[in-house]
Image (cartoon, rainbow, N blue to C red):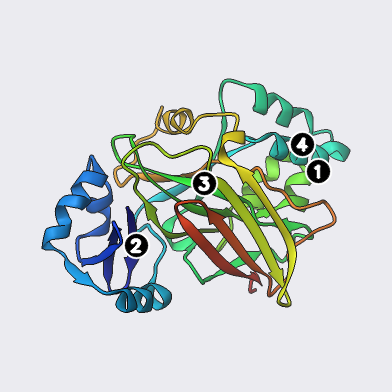
Amino acid sequence: MHLYRTSKGNIISYNGNVYLNNSEWTSLINRSGLHDYLSSLISSSQKIDAAQFREIVSQNTLPPLTQQEVWAAGVTYLRSRDARMEESKDTGGSDCYEKVYTADRPELFFKAMPHRVSGPGEEVYIRRDSTWNVPEPELALFINNSGTIQAYTVGNDMSSRSIEGENPLYLPQAKMYERSVALGPCLYIPSKPFDRNSSITLRIERDNNTAYEGSVKVDKMKRTLEELAKWLFAELKFPYGSFLLTGTGLVPPDHFTLQHGDVVHITIENIGTLSNTVKVSPP
């Protein structure tokens, strides 16, 4: 089951049919047993045809959050650990990433408030004071206000590697700025836990050509999804629920950096594709 937040209402896609529903978003997605609850809403929702669905989704899709904070987990894949160690080796900060990768406690950091989150088709920014920038394609969890993983979506955790590489303590500046994250295109609400054999694919388009492409399985992640959610909610309360980016296993080569006008496409099996155009952050 897929749930889209659009300016025309919420769209429920289920068993090949689509339905338009006007429930309030935050209370809707925080309902326990979300899959079954959405199934029960279908009978009272307006059924729409495929053409209507395509028109609404292509022009009116919003990021799947209203009041929810976005958090992120770092160094959850071996490839991410190696990339962080490499970028920090000249400043003496590389050892901390090895320790984080093997520690019981994961790295968790705040990423964005809702007004800084881009949706499908919107722009994501690279900082003007960074010389090395990459997208980080990630599976994102929606965890409801009771701490239960309710749904999944595609996340793009934009990262300024030149800034983080100067000093690990610069992580907030490397990660948190205007339009530094995108979520979408929908919430995927399966009837059973997410299949970790699913693939995450990243394609970066530049001047209508592929500048980078790669793929990784979610099961390459060192930590479980439930473990990350448990640590996030250990000492924090989220009355509206929270989104948690779960880390990246895809890192472009060191000579690659995003440019103004690049288009980032991130696809996760069973969820869909999130596409965003890169722009240099305006003054």
Q: Are marks 3 and 4 in contact (CB under 8 Å)?
A: no
| Residue located beneath label 4 in the image | 82
Foreground: disc 2 or disc 4? 2
Q: Which residue is mark 3?
A: 139
Amino acid on which the number 2 mark rests in the picture? Tyr
Q: Secondary structure at mark 2?
A: strand
Residue 260 occupies quadrant: bottom right
Indicate the amino acid at tag 4. Asp
Q: Are marks 1 and 3 in contact (CB under 8 Å)?
A: no
Indicate the quadrant containing the C terminus: top left, top right, bottom left or bottom right: bottom right
Q: Is residue 81 above or below residue 121?
A: above
Q: Nearer the viewer, residue 253 or 49?
A: 49
Determine the secondary structure under disc 3. strand
Marks 2,4: beta carbons within 8 A: no
In this rendering, which labeled residue sits more in front, label 2 or label 1? Answer: 2
Q: CA distance from mark 2 to mark 4?
A: 36 Å
Alpha carbon distance from label 2 to label 1: 38 Å
* Horizontal relation, residue 124 to residue 237: left or right: right
Q: Which residue is mark 2?
A: 4
Q: Quadrant of residue 79?
A: top right
Q: Which residue is mark 1?
A: 87
Disc nearer the start of the sequence (3/2): 2
At a point 26% along the width and 46% down the height, the residue shown is: 35
Closer to the chain start, of discs 2 and 1, is 2
